[in-house]
Image (cartoon, rainbow, N blue to C red):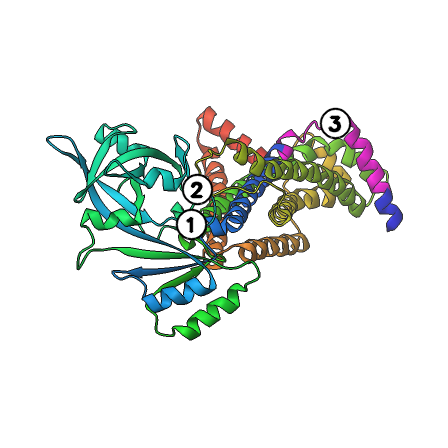
Amino acid sequence: MRKSFILACRVAGRELRGGLKGFRVFLACLTLGVGAVAAVGSVAEALLAGLEQDARKILGGDLALRLVHREIDPAARDWLAARATVSAASYLRAMAETGTPPNRTVVELKAVDGRYPLFGDAQLAPDMSVSTALARADDRWGAAVDASLLDRLGLAVGGEVRIGDAMFTIRAVIKREPDRIGNPAALMLGPRVLVAAESLAATGLIRPGSLVTYAYAIRLPPDASLTAFKAELASAFPEAPWFVRDRTEPSPNVTRFIERTALFMAFVGLASLLIGGVGVGNAAVAYLGRKTEAIATLKCLGAESRFIFQTYLVQMAAMASVGIVAGLAIGAAAPFGVAWVMPETFPVSLEARLFPKALAIAAAAGALVSAAFSLAPLARAARVRPGALFRDLVVPVGRRTGWRVAVAIGAISLVLATVVVATAPDRRLAAWFVVGAIVSLAAFRFAAVGAVRLARVARHIGVVEIRLAHTSAVAVTAL
Protein backbone atom coordinates (compact mmCIF):
# COMPACT_ATOMS: atom_id res chain seq x y z
CA MET A 1 0.00 0.00 0.00
CA ARG A 2 2.87 2.34 0.84
CA LYS A 3 4.62 1.53 -2.45
CA SER A 4 1.39 2.12 -4.33
CA PHE A 5 1.02 5.58 -2.73
CA ILE A 6 4.65 6.49 -3.51
CA LEU A 7 4.12 5.45 -7.13
CA ALA A 8 0.89 7.49 -7.22
CA CYS A 9 2.85 10.51 -6.00
CA ARG A 10 5.44 10.02 -8.74
CA VAL A 11 2.80 9.77 -11.47
CA ALA A 12 1.01 12.84 -10.07
CA GLY A 13 4.28 14.77 -10.01
CA ARG A 14 5.04 13.93 -13.63
CA GLU A 15 1.58 15.08 -14.73
CA LEU A 16 2.00 18.33 -12.81
CA ARG A 17 5.17 19.11 -14.75
CA GLY A 18 2.95 20.48 -17.46
CA GLY A 19 2.24 23.52 -15.28
CA LEU A 20 -1.01 24.96 -14.01
CA LYS A 21 -2.99 24.36 -17.19
CA GLY A 22 -6.44 23.17 -16.17
CA PHE A 23 -6.02 24.39 -12.59
CA ARG A 24 -6.29 28.15 -13.10
CA VAL A 25 -9.98 28.30 -12.19
CA PHE A 26 -9.38 25.87 -9.33
CA LEU A 27 -6.58 28.04 -7.92
CA ALA A 28 -8.42 31.34 -8.47
CA CYS A 29 -11.55 30.18 -6.63
CA LEU A 30 -9.62 28.75 -3.70
CA THR A 31 -7.21 31.67 -3.43
CA LEU A 32 -9.96 34.29 -3.39
CA GLY A 33 -12.07 32.36 -0.89
CA VAL A 34 -9.25 31.63 1.55
CA GLY A 35 -7.87 35.14 1.09
CA ALA A 36 -11.23 36.70 1.98
CA VAL A 37 -11.60 34.62 5.16
CA ALA A 38 -7.98 35.18 6.23
CA ALA A 39 -8.06 38.93 5.51
CA VAL A 40 -11.26 39.55 7.45
CA GLY A 41 -10.07 37.53 10.43
CA SER A 42 -6.61 39.13 10.47
CA VAL A 43 -7.89 42.72 10.22
CA ALA A 44 -10.48 42.11 12.95
CA GLU A 45 -7.85 40.67 15.29
CA ALA A 46 -5.50 43.54 14.44
CA LEU A 47 -8.17 46.09 15.41
CA LEU A 48 -9.00 44.27 18.65
CA ALA A 49 -5.29 43.99 19.50
CA GLY A 50 -4.86 47.71 18.82
CA LEU A 51 -7.88 48.44 21.00
CA GLU A 52 -6.35 46.41 23.82
CA GLN A 53 -2.95 48.05 23.35
CA ASP A 54 -4.47 51.55 23.52
CA ALA A 55 -6.85 50.65 26.35
CA ARG A 56 -5.49 53.26 28.79
CA LYS A 57 -5.60 56.00 26.15
CA ILE A 58 -9.12 55.14 25.06
CA LEU A 59 -10.44 54.88 28.62
CA GLY A 60 -8.39 57.84 29.84
CA GLY A 61 -6.83 55.87 32.69
CA ASP A 62 -6.45 52.45 34.28
CA LEU A 63 -9.90 52.87 35.74
CA ALA A 64 -12.81 55.23 35.09
CA LEU A 65 -15.80 56.15 37.24
CA ARG A 66 -18.93 57.70 35.77
CA LEU A 67 -21.84 59.45 37.45
CA VAL A 68 -24.87 61.28 36.04
CA HIS A 69 -26.37 64.48 37.51
CA ARG A 70 -24.00 64.54 40.47
CA GLU A 71 -20.31 64.84 41.23
CA ILE A 72 -18.34 62.39 43.28
CA ASP A 73 -18.51 62.81 47.06
CA PRO A 74 -15.58 64.73 48.61
CA ALA A 75 -14.77 61.74 50.84
CA ALA A 76 -14.50 59.44 47.82
CA ARG A 77 -12.49 62.05 45.92
CA ASP A 78 -10.00 62.30 48.82
CA TRP A 79 -9.82 58.50 49.08
CA LEU A 80 -8.97 58.20 45.39
CA ALA A 81 -6.48 61.09 45.45
CA ALA A 82 -4.57 59.43 48.30
CA ARG A 83 -4.08 56.23 46.29
CA ALA A 84 -3.92 57.29 42.62
CA THR A 85 -3.87 60.20 40.20
CA VAL A 86 -7.36 61.43 39.30
CA SER A 87 -8.46 63.58 36.36
CA ALA A 88 -12.04 64.87 36.26
CA ALA A 89 -14.10 65.75 33.20
CA SER A 90 -17.69 66.89 32.69
CA TYR A 91 -19.77 66.16 29.60
CA LEU A 92 -22.94 67.99 28.56
CA ARG A 93 -24.72 69.30 25.49
CA ALA A 94 -24.98 73.03 24.93
CA MET A 95 -25.74 75.62 22.28
CA ALA A 96 -22.87 77.57 20.70
CA GLU A 97 -23.65 80.84 18.96
CA THR A 98 -21.88 83.71 17.29
CA GLY A 99 -22.66 86.86 15.33
CA THR A 100 -25.68 89.16 15.07
CA PRO A 101 -28.21 87.81 14.36
CA PRO A 102 -26.78 84.75 16.13
CA ASN A 103 -25.78 81.64 14.22
CA ARG A 104 -26.34 78.66 16.50
CA THR A 105 -25.50 74.97 16.62
CA VAL A 106 -25.60 72.16 19.18
CA VAL A 107 -22.18 71.18 20.58
CA GLU A 108 -20.82 68.47 22.84
CA LEU A 109 -19.10 70.34 25.66
CA LYS A 110 -16.26 68.65 27.52
CA ALA A 111 -14.74 70.44 30.51
CA VAL A 112 -11.41 69.02 31.70
CA ASP A 113 -8.99 69.78 34.51
CA GLY A 114 -5.27 70.47 34.31
CA ARG A 115 -4.29 66.79 34.45
CA TYR A 116 -6.07 65.88 31.23
CA PRO A 117 -5.13 63.62 29.51
CA LEU A 118 -3.57 61.09 31.89
CA PHE A 119 -2.60 58.82 28.99
CA GLY A 120 -1.93 59.67 25.37
CA ASP A 121 -1.68 63.08 23.77
CA ALA A 122 -4.36 65.43 22.53
CA GLN A 123 -3.20 66.78 19.17
CA LEU A 124 -4.21 70.37 18.44
CA ALA A 125 -3.66 72.68 15.47
CA PRO A 126 -1.77 74.94 15.83
CA ASP A 127 0.45 72.73 17.95
CA MET A 128 0.09 73.59 21.64
CA SER A 129 -0.71 71.93 24.95
CA VAL A 130 -4.29 71.53 26.15
CA SER A 131 -3.67 73.74 29.18
CA THR A 132 -2.36 76.54 26.95
CA ALA A 133 -5.31 76.32 24.58
CA LEU A 134 -7.89 76.40 27.39
CA ALA A 135 -6.25 78.97 29.66
CA ARG A 136 -7.93 82.31 30.49
CA ALA A 137 -6.36 85.37 28.80
CA ASP A 138 -7.68 88.90 28.15
CA ASP A 139 -10.88 88.10 30.08
CA ARG A 140 -11.65 85.22 27.74
CA TRP A 141 -11.45 81.52 28.35
CA GLY A 142 -9.89 79.48 25.57
CA ALA A 143 -11.46 76.56 23.75
CA ALA A 144 -10.36 73.82 21.34
CA VAL A 145 -13.04 72.73 18.87
CA ASP A 146 -13.71 70.29 16.09
CA ALA A 147 -13.10 71.67 12.61
CA SER A 148 -16.77 71.06 11.76
CA LEU A 149 -17.81 73.74 14.27
CA LEU A 150 -15.78 76.33 12.37
CA ASP A 151 -17.52 75.33 9.15
CA ARG A 152 -20.98 75.48 10.69
CA LEU A 153 -20.53 78.88 12.30
CA GLY A 154 -18.24 80.40 9.67
CA LEU A 155 -15.43 80.95 12.17
CA ALA A 156 -11.65 80.55 12.20
CA VAL A 157 -9.04 80.01 14.87
CA GLY A 158 -8.97 83.22 16.92
CA GLY A 159 -12.71 83.80 16.59
CA GLU A 160 -15.11 83.99 19.52
CA VAL A 161 -18.11 81.86 20.36
CA ARG A 162 -20.68 82.13 23.14
CA ILE A 163 -21.62 79.06 25.15
CA GLY A 164 -24.21 79.75 27.81
CA ASP A 165 -23.30 83.01 29.54
CA ALA A 166 -19.57 82.86 28.73
CA MET A 167 -17.55 83.95 25.72
CA PHE A 168 -14.71 81.68 24.54
CA THR A 169 -11.83 82.37 22.18
CA ILE A 170 -11.18 79.50 19.79
CA ARG A 171 -7.45 78.90 20.10
CA ALA A 172 -7.04 75.53 18.40
CA VAL A 173 -8.70 72.81 16.34
CA ILE A 174 -8.86 69.29 17.77
CA LYS A 175 -6.95 66.88 15.53
CA ARG A 176 -6.96 63.91 17.89
CA GLU A 177 -8.72 63.33 21.19
CA PRO A 178 -7.24 60.16 22.73
CA ASP A 179 -10.28 59.19 24.81
CA ARG A 180 -13.04 60.16 22.38
CA ILE A 181 -14.36 56.66 21.72
CA GLY A 182 -14.30 56.03 25.47
CA ASN A 183 -16.60 59.03 25.88
CA PRO A 184 -19.39 58.30 28.40
CA ALA A 185 -21.85 60.12 26.14
CA ALA A 186 -23.62 57.45 24.13
CA LEU A 187 -24.34 59.68 21.15
CA MET A 188 -22.56 62.79 19.91
CA LEU A 189 -25.09 65.18 18.41
CA GLY A 190 -22.69 67.99 17.60
CA PRO A 191 -19.03 69.00 17.30
CA ARG A 192 -16.75 68.67 20.30
CA VAL A 193 -15.84 71.81 22.27
CA LEU A 194 -13.05 71.33 24.80
CA VAL A 195 -12.91 73.87 27.66
CA ALA A 196 -11.32 74.19 31.07
CA ALA A 197 -13.25 72.86 34.07
CA GLU A 198 -12.90 76.25 35.81
CA SER A 199 -14.78 77.95 32.97
CA LEU A 200 -17.86 75.77 33.36
CA ALA A 201 -19.25 77.87 36.23
CA ALA A 202 -19.12 81.00 34.07
CA THR A 203 -21.40 79.42 31.48
CA GLY A 204 -24.27 79.05 33.91
CA LEU A 205 -25.14 75.69 32.38
CA ILE A 206 -24.83 73.69 35.59
CA ARG A 207 -28.27 74.01 37.14
CA PRO A 208 -30.67 71.67 38.94
CA GLY A 209 -31.92 69.13 36.41
CA SER A 210 -29.07 69.69 33.91
CA LEU A 211 -28.04 66.50 32.15
CA VAL A 212 -24.35 66.38 33.05
CA THR A 213 -22.12 63.32 33.07
CA TYR A 214 -19.15 63.41 35.42
CA ALA A 215 -16.23 61.14 34.55
CA TYR A 216 -13.15 60.47 36.67
CA ALA A 217 -10.11 58.88 35.04
CA ILE A 218 -7.76 57.15 37.49
CA ARG A 219 -4.10 56.34 36.92
CA LEU A 220 -2.76 53.74 39.32
CA PRO A 221 0.82 53.63 40.61
CA PRO A 222 3.10 51.37 38.52
CA ASP A 223 3.21 48.65 41.20
CA ALA A 224 -0.54 48.68 41.93
CA SER A 225 -2.81 45.76 41.04
CA LEU A 226 -5.94 46.69 39.11
CA THR A 227 -7.91 43.78 40.54
CA ALA A 228 -6.87 44.56 44.11
CA PHE A 229 -7.65 48.27 43.69
CA LYS A 230 -11.14 47.53 42.34
CA ALA A 231 -11.82 45.16 45.24
CA GLU A 232 -10.61 47.77 47.74
CA LEU A 233 -12.75 50.46 46.08
CA ALA A 234 -15.86 48.26 46.18
CA SER A 235 -15.20 47.43 49.84
CA ALA A 236 -14.69 51.08 50.82
CA PHE A 237 -17.80 52.32 48.96
CA PRO A 238 -20.21 49.37 48.65
CA GLU A 239 -23.23 51.58 47.82
CA ALA A 240 -21.48 54.08 45.56
CA PRO A 241 -23.68 55.31 42.67
CA TRP A 242 -20.95 55.29 40.06
CA PHE A 243 -20.45 53.02 37.08
CA VAL A 244 -16.97 51.49 36.87
CA ARG A 245 -14.95 50.52 33.78
CA ASP A 246 -11.34 49.44 33.59
CA ARG A 247 -8.64 49.03 30.96
CA THR A 248 -9.60 45.40 30.24
CA GLU A 249 -12.70 46.70 28.43
CA PRO A 250 -12.05 50.34 27.54
CA SER A 251 -14.90 50.72 25.05
CA PRO A 252 -17.54 47.96 25.06
CA ASN A 253 -19.48 49.56 22.20
CA VAL A 254 -16.42 49.71 19.95
CA THR A 255 -15.42 46.15 20.86
CA ARG A 256 -18.93 44.93 20.11
CA PHE A 257 -19.00 46.84 16.82
CA ILE A 258 -15.66 45.39 15.68
CA GLU A 259 -16.67 41.85 16.65
CA ARG A 260 -20.08 42.07 14.95
CA THR A 261 -18.63 43.65 11.82
CA ALA A 262 -15.91 41.00 11.72
CA LEU A 263 -18.52 38.27 12.20
CA PHE A 264 -20.68 39.40 9.28
CA MET A 265 -17.64 40.03 7.08
CA ALA A 266 -16.39 36.55 7.98
CA PHE A 267 -19.75 35.17 6.84
CA VAL A 268 -19.27 37.02 3.55
CA GLY A 269 -15.80 35.49 3.26
CA LEU A 270 -17.11 32.01 4.03
CA ALA A 271 -19.91 32.45 1.51
CA SER A 272 -17.29 33.46 -1.04
CA LEU A 273 -15.29 30.37 -0.13
CA LEU A 274 -18.35 28.12 -0.57
CA ILE A 275 -19.11 29.71 -3.93
CA GLY A 276 -15.45 29.21 -4.78
CA GLY A 277 -15.90 25.58 -3.70
CA VAL A 278 -18.48 25.15 -6.46
CA GLY A 279 -15.88 26.52 -8.88
CA VAL A 280 -13.32 24.11 -7.41
CA GLY A 281 -15.68 21.20 -8.00
CA ASN A 282 -16.42 22.25 -11.58
CA ALA A 283 -12.72 22.76 -12.25
CA ALA A 284 -12.01 19.26 -10.89
CA VAL A 285 -14.72 17.80 -13.13
CA ALA A 286 -13.34 19.61 -16.18
CA TYR A 287 -9.75 18.61 -15.40
CA LEU A 288 -10.58 14.94 -14.87
CA GLY A 289 -12.71 15.01 -18.01
CA ARG A 290 -9.60 15.99 -19.98
CA LYS A 291 -7.69 13.15 -18.32
CA THR A 292 -10.15 10.48 -19.42
CA GLU A 293 -7.77 8.98 -21.96
CA ALA A 294 -4.89 8.86 -19.45
CA ILE A 295 -7.12 7.25 -16.80
CA ALA A 296 -8.37 4.69 -19.32
CA THR A 297 -4.80 3.81 -20.30
CA LEU A 298 -3.77 3.34 -16.66
CA LYS A 299 -6.83 1.14 -16.07
CA CYS A 300 -5.98 -1.01 -19.08
CA LEU A 301 -2.42 -1.41 -17.78
CA GLY A 302 -3.77 -2.84 -14.55
CA ALA A 303 -4.01 0.20 -12.34
CA GLU A 304 -6.55 -0.26 -9.57
CA SER A 305 -9.24 2.27 -8.71
CA ARG A 306 -7.41 3.08 -5.48
CA PHE A 307 -4.24 3.95 -7.42
CA ILE A 308 -6.21 6.23 -9.79
CA PHE A 309 -7.91 7.89 -6.83
CA GLN A 310 -4.60 8.42 -5.01
CA THR A 311 -2.87 9.81 -8.09
CA TYR A 312 -5.38 12.53 -8.77
CA LEU A 313 -6.03 13.15 -5.10
CA VAL A 314 -2.35 14.04 -4.74
CA GLN A 315 -2.65 16.43 -7.68
CA MET A 316 -5.75 18.10 -6.23
CA ALA A 317 -4.12 18.32 -2.81
CA ALA A 318 -0.98 19.88 -4.28
CA MET A 319 -2.97 22.49 -6.20
CA ALA A 320 -5.19 23.12 -3.16
CA SER A 321 -2.08 23.73 -1.08
CA VAL A 322 -0.87 26.29 -3.61
CA GLY A 323 -4.24 28.06 -3.58
CA ILE A 324 -4.45 28.02 0.22
CA VAL A 325 -0.92 29.39 0.62
CA ALA A 326 -1.67 32.16 -1.88
CA GLY A 327 -4.88 33.01 0.01
CA LEU A 328 -3.04 33.02 3.34
CA ALA A 329 -0.47 35.40 1.87
CA ILE A 330 -3.29 37.79 0.98
CA GLY A 331 -4.77 37.48 4.46
CA ALA A 332 -1.41 37.93 6.19
CA ALA A 333 -0.71 41.10 4.20
CA ALA A 334 -4.18 42.59 4.85
CA PRO A 335 -3.41 44.16 8.29
CA PHE A 336 -0.27 45.81 6.90
CA GLY A 337 -2.20 47.19 3.92
CA VAL A 338 -5.03 48.51 6.09
CA ALA A 339 -2.55 50.08 8.51
CA TRP A 340 -0.81 51.80 5.59
CA VAL A 341 -4.02 53.40 4.26
CA MET A 342 -5.64 54.03 7.66
CA PRO A 343 -5.86 57.76 8.44
CA GLU A 344 -3.95 59.07 11.45
CA THR A 345 -7.16 60.46 12.90
CA PHE A 346 -8.71 56.98 13.16
CA PRO A 347 -9.62 56.55 16.84
CA VAL A 348 -8.26 52.99 17.14
CA SER A 349 -4.73 52.01 16.17
CA LEU A 350 -4.24 48.80 14.22
CA GLU A 351 -1.54 46.37 15.30
CA ALA A 352 -0.02 45.20 12.01
CA ARG A 353 1.45 41.73 12.50
CA LEU A 354 0.71 38.11 11.70
CA PHE A 355 -2.27 36.51 13.44
CA PRO A 356 -1.82 32.71 13.38
CA LYS A 357 -5.33 31.94 14.66
CA ALA A 358 -7.07 33.76 11.80
CA LEU A 359 -4.73 32.20 9.24
CA ALA A 360 -5.21 28.72 10.70
CA ILE A 361 -9.01 29.05 10.54
CA ALA A 362 -8.82 30.20 6.92
CA ALA A 363 -6.44 27.37 5.99
CA ALA A 364 -8.66 24.76 7.64
CA ALA A 365 -11.77 26.13 5.92
CA GLY A 366 -10.01 26.17 2.54
CA ALA A 367 -8.74 22.59 2.93
CA LEU A 368 -12.16 21.30 4.00
CA VAL A 369 -14.02 23.09 1.21
CA SER A 370 -11.60 21.89 -1.47
CA ALA A 371 -11.85 18.33 -0.14
CA ALA A 372 -15.65 18.39 0.03
CA PHE A 373 -16.06 19.62 -3.56
CA SER A 374 -13.22 17.58 -5.12
CA LEU A 375 -13.92 14.20 -3.55
CA ALA A 376 -16.97 13.26 -5.64
CA PRO A 377 -15.35 13.89 -9.08
CA LEU A 378 -12.27 11.95 -7.97
CA ALA A 379 -14.33 9.01 -6.77
CA ARG A 380 -16.42 8.91 -9.95
CA ALA A 381 -13.29 8.95 -12.12
CA ALA A 382 -11.73 6.10 -10.16
CA ARG A 383 -14.85 3.85 -10.12
CA VAL A 384 -15.65 3.47 -13.79
CA ARG A 385 -14.39 0.65 -15.99
CA PRO A 386 -11.77 1.08 -18.74
CA GLY A 387 -14.31 0.46 -21.51
CA ALA A 388 -16.65 3.09 -20.10
CA LEU A 389 -13.79 5.54 -19.92
CA PHE A 390 -12.97 5.04 -23.60
CA ARG A 391 -16.63 5.37 -24.54
CA ASP A 392 -16.72 8.54 -22.47
CA LEU A 393 -14.50 10.16 -25.11
CA VAL A 394 -17.44 9.95 -27.53
CA VAL A 395 -20.62 9.57 -25.44
CA PRO A 396 -20.48 10.69 -21.81
CA VAL A 397 -21.90 8.18 -19.33
CA GLY A 398 -23.56 9.00 -16.04
CA ARG A 399 -21.58 8.23 -12.90
CA ARG A 400 -22.92 7.95 -9.41
CA THR A 401 -21.05 8.68 -6.22
CA GLY A 402 -20.72 5.68 -3.91
CA TRP A 403 -22.18 5.73 -0.40
CA ARG A 404 -18.72 5.75 1.19
CA VAL A 405 -17.77 8.90 -0.65
CA ALA A 406 -21.11 10.48 0.28
CA VAL A 407 -20.47 9.66 3.95
CA ALA A 408 -16.95 11.11 3.69
CA ILE A 409 -18.29 14.33 2.13
CA GLY A 410 -20.91 14.55 4.87
CA ALA A 411 -18.25 14.09 7.56
CA ILE A 412 -16.04 16.80 6.00
CA SER A 413 -19.01 19.15 5.81
CA LEU A 414 -19.81 18.47 9.46
CA VAL A 415 -16.23 19.27 10.47
CA LEU A 416 -16.37 22.49 8.43
CA ALA A 417 -19.64 23.51 10.11
CA THR A 418 -18.10 22.75 13.52
CA VAL A 419 -15.08 24.92 12.74
CA VAL A 420 -17.31 27.81 11.62
CA VAL A 421 -19.50 27.66 14.73
CA ALA A 422 -16.71 27.00 17.23
CA THR A 423 -14.51 29.88 16.07
CA ALA A 424 -17.27 32.51 15.71
CA PRO A 425 -17.77 35.18 18.42
CA ASP A 426 -21.54 34.63 18.21
CA ARG A 427 -22.17 30.90 17.86
CA ARG A 428 -25.93 31.28 17.47
CA LEU A 429 -25.55 33.49 14.39
CA ALA A 430 -22.85 31.17 13.06
CA ALA A 431 -25.18 28.18 13.43
CA TRP A 432 -27.89 30.02 11.49
CA PHE A 433 -25.34 30.84 8.80
CA VAL A 434 -24.49 27.14 8.48
CA VAL A 435 -28.18 26.27 8.20
CA GLY A 436 -28.67 28.96 5.56
CA ALA A 437 -25.69 27.72 3.57
CA ILE A 438 -27.00 24.14 3.60
CA VAL A 439 -30.47 25.26 2.53
CA SER A 440 -29.02 27.42 -0.25
CA LEU A 441 -26.82 24.64 -1.63
CA ALA A 442 -29.72 22.19 -1.48
CA ALA A 443 -32.00 24.68 -3.25
CA PHE A 444 -29.46 25.17 -6.05
CA ARG A 445 -29.06 21.40 -6.35
CA PHE A 446 -32.80 20.84 -6.63
CA ALA A 447 -33.07 23.68 -9.12
CA ALA A 448 -30.36 22.10 -11.28
CA VAL A 449 -32.06 18.67 -11.15
CA GLY A 450 -35.38 20.27 -11.98
CA ALA A 451 -33.89 22.08 -14.97
CA VAL A 452 -32.40 18.84 -16.31
CA ARG A 453 -35.68 16.96 -15.92
CA LEU A 454 -37.53 19.79 -17.61
CA ALA A 455 -35.05 19.57 -20.49
CA ARG A 456 -35.69 15.83 -20.79
CA VAL A 457 -39.39 16.46 -21.04
CA ALA A 458 -38.74 19.12 -23.68
CA ARG A 459 -36.77 16.76 -25.94
CA HIS A 460 -39.98 15.60 -27.58
CA ILE A 461 -40.69 19.13 -28.76
CA GLY A 462 -39.93 19.60 -32.42
CA VAL A 463 -38.07 22.89 -32.01
CA VAL A 464 -34.37 22.44 -32.95
CA GLU A 465 -33.07 24.95 -30.41
CA ILE A 466 -34.82 23.19 -27.52
CA ARG A 467 -33.50 19.78 -28.57
CA LEU A 468 -29.95 21.14 -28.78
CA ALA A 469 -30.35 22.64 -25.30
CA HIS A 470 -31.50 19.24 -24.01
CA THR A 471 -28.48 17.48 -25.52
CA SER A 472 -26.10 20.01 -23.96
CA ALA A 473 -27.76 19.64 -20.55
CA VAL A 474 -27.41 15.86 -20.67
CA ALA A 475 -23.71 16.16 -21.57
CA VAL A 476 -23.02 18.58 -18.72
CA THR A 477 -24.90 16.40 -16.24
CA ALA A 478 -22.83 13.41 -17.23
CA LEU A 479 -19.68 15.26 -16.29
Quadrant location of the C terminus in the rendered image = top right
Element class at badge 2: loop
Residue 236, horizontal then vertical, whole percent: 41, 74
Other residues around mark 3 within 10 Å, as few (<14) / some (14–19) / many (≥20): few
Question: Which secondary structure is most common in the magenta stretch?
Answer: helix
For the point 40% across and 50% down, the residue is: 182
For label 1, the residue is 254
Q: Is residue 258 above or below residue 221?
A: above
Residue 96, horizontal then vertical, whole percent: 20, 39
Indicate the amino acid at tag 1: Val
The Cα–Cα distance between marks 3 and 1, rounded to whole angstroms, is 48 Å
For the point 44% across and 49% down, the residue is: 58
Of badges 3 and 1, the one in the foreground is 1
Corner quadrant of residue 303: top right
For label 2, the residue is 347
Indicate the amino acid at tag 3: Gly
Q: Which residues are magenta?
A: 7-27
Looking at this view, name the residue that lies furthest to the right. Answer: 3
Task: Confirm whether the magenta stretch covers residue 20.
Answer: yes
Q: Relative to the observer, which residue lies in front, 274 or 446?
A: 274
Q: Is residue 468 above or below residue 276?
A: above
Residue 370, horizontal then vertical, whole percent: 64, 43
* Image-based side of 466 in relation to 139, left or right: right
- Label whose residue precedes the other's in the sequence (1 or 2): 1
Other residues around mark 2 within 10 Å, as few (<14) / some (14–19) / many (≥20): some
